[in-house]
């Protein structure tokens, strides 16, 4: 019996390693992993169903709670109040989404190229992951490598695109790097913004003599044309001199609140 | 024992697979795992308290592995790793191996803690989270830093709190199972 478990453990462990190697190989070749795509095609409908159900049940429970309060109080005014409150909540939710959409519309003319609006359907914000899933995919012209922006600034880049969905790697994720400019009153300096897998970004490779100070705005430099220029990245929070490499480094607070993202803009047809 | 040894006849593996009585349980486990991983992307960030957030995939993996024999637990760990890695499309091998080891460790806990006790569900979840997250830290090159350990500790606390009600629910759906006796097939 013990031996049989040992064989199964070894078999599954070897399969895991082989699948990992296969996945890395496909990723480096910029090709989709068929197995993970298959699993996603099963789980993402479940995720969408949970989301729809959560929204529906949330509204239903909210209405039920209010109805019970109305029955208890037998007060018509309370009933009217509850109805208005429900309406207000709905309007507040709509207003929040509307504000984000309006802000995106204001940003839109400043962006060159074709962009498409997308709704965020899932957040994966654990350290080392830092991804979001959006409801646009290859069929909408969204390809891997396309930049993603919100009304406040740069969000990240499409890491992987299915036909109807895409996975966006956030700016704060490990291995993310964006060429940046620091807007200081004295001089504009350049550097590289790197994700650290935490809630903040590291601004690296700034020349040691560059005048930067806390509160300076950091924007995209647009070098390499992967990301559009002049998009807000964040604000400098802490600065120090790395004497070993003779560069200035800084911690940057992202301009976009990644947990509050509801809608984003994605560049169409752009990618690797 | 007859002359032809009918008692020793072992059906072909395809026949054993078709006649296997565990399909209903497998389906239930599959649905629970898909649901847990689906819920993760939609609910987890809304339920965050400070640095603590739940990991429904790990929670469900630990509870099912605790109520199942090691062979089933291994498949459960493998499946959770595969689903979690597929959703984020990265660190596939690391997630597969860490979840596999986590589930295997939890599957051996019934030797020390009875599945009848509610408290043992918390132990199972704690062991599952600690083993899985520690091995993920070792295996995944992109993961590191203090934030990872803070979040892992948050997951540990959150999952342990949720283990109590969830253990009761999962135990209703999937009653504790012993390893199938190989003697049935005269192995």
Image: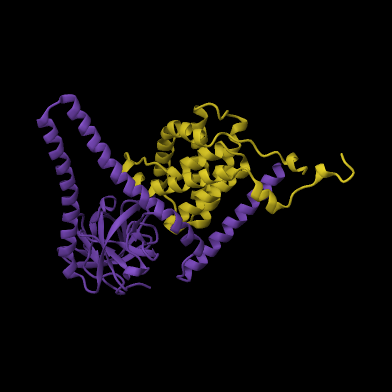
Q: Is residue B108 left or right of residue A35?
A: right
Depth check: give the residue in front, A137 or A194: A137
Identify which residue is drawn at 32% across, 51% down: A199
Of all residues, the one furthest to the right in this rendering is: B3
The vertical placement of B66 against B15, above or below, is: above
Residue A42 image position (x, y, % from top left)? 45, 55
User: Residue at coordinates 31% horizontally, 72% vertically from top-left?
Assistant: A226
- In the image, taking residue A22 as reference, residue A6 lies left or right, namely right
- Residue A151 is drawn in which quadrant? bottom left
Chain ID, purple in image? A
Q: Is residue B87 left or right of residue A119?
A: right
In what quadrant of the picture does the N terminus of chain B appear?
Answer: top right
Q: Which residue: 38% across, 66% down?
A: A163
Task: Report x, y in % for residue B49.
Answer: 32, 39
The image quarter containing residue A184 is bottom left
In this view of the protein, can residue B139 be seen by the observer? Answer: no
Q: Residue A219 in the image: state x and y as whole percent.
A: 23, 64
**So how many labels did they put on this image?**
0
Q: Is residue A91 visible?
A: yes
Q: Establish if B124 lies above or below A151.
A: above
Specify the chain shown as yellow: B
Residue shown at 71% from the left, 41% from the top: A1
Residue A206 lies, in percent from the top left, at: 29, 64
Which residue is more in the foreground, B101 or B183? Answer: B183
Choose top left, top right, bottom left or bottom right for residue A167.
bottom left
> Which image quadrant: the C terminus of chain B?
top right
Viewer-proximal residue, A232 or B176?
Answer: B176
The answer to whether A28 appears left or right of A77 in the picture is right
> How is the structure coloured here?
by chain
């Amino acid at each position: 019996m013990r031996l049989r478990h040992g064989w199964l453990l070894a078999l599954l462990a070897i399969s895991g390693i082989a699948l990992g190697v296969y996945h890395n190989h496909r990723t480096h070749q910029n090709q989709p992993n068929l197995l993970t795509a298959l699993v996603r095609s099963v789980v993402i409908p479940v995720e969408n169903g949970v989301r729809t159900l959560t929204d529906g049940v949330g509204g239903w429970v909210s209405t039920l709670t209010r109805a019970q309060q109305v029955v208890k109080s037998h007060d018509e005014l309370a009933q009217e109040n509850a109805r208005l409150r429900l309406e207000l909540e709905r309007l507040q939710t709509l207003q929040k989404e509307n504000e984000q959409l309006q802000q995106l519309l204001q940003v839109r003319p400043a962006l060159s190229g074709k962009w498409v609006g997308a709704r965020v359907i899932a957040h994966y914000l654990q350290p080392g992951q830092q991804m979001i899933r959006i409801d646009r995919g290859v069929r909408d012209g969204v390809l891997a490598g396309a930049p993603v922006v919100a009304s406040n600034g740069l969000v990240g880049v499409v890491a992987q695109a299915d036909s109807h969905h895409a996975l966006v790697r956030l700016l704060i994720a490990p291995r993310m790097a964006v060429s940046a400019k620091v807007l200081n009153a004295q001089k504009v300096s350049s550097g590289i913004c790197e994700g650290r897998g935490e809630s903040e970004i590291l601004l690296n490779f700034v020349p040691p003599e560059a005048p930067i100070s806390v509160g300076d705005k950091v924007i995209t430099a647009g070098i390499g044309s992967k990301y559009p220029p002049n998009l807000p990245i964040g604000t400098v929070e802490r600065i120090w001199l790395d004497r070993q490499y003779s560069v200035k480094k800084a911690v940057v607070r992202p301009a976009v609140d990644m947990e509050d993202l509801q809608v984003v803009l994605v560049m169409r047809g752009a990618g690797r | 024992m007859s002359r032809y040894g009918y008692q020793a006849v072992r059906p072909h593996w395809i026949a054993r697979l078709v006649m296997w009585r565990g399909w209903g349980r497998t389906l239930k486990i599959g649905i629970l795992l898909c649901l847990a991983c689906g819920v993760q992307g939609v609910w987890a960030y809304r339920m965050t308290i400070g640095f603590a957030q739940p990991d429904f995939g790990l929670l469900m993996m630990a509870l099912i592995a605790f109520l199942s024999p090691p062979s089933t637990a291994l498949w459960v760990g493998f499946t959770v790793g595969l689903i979690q890695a597929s959703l984020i499309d990265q660190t596939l091998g690391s997630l597969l191996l860490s979840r596999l080891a986590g589930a295997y460790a939890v599957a051996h806990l019934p030797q020390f803690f009875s599945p009848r006790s509610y408290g043992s569900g918390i132990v199972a979840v704690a062991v599952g989270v600690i083993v899985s997250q520690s091995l993920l830290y070792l295996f995944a090159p992109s993961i590191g830093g203090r934030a990872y350990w803070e979040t892992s500790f948050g997951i540990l606390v959150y999952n342990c709190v949720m283990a109590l009600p969830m253990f009761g629910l999962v135990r209703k759906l999937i009653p504790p199972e012993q390893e199938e006796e190989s003697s049935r097939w005269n192995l």
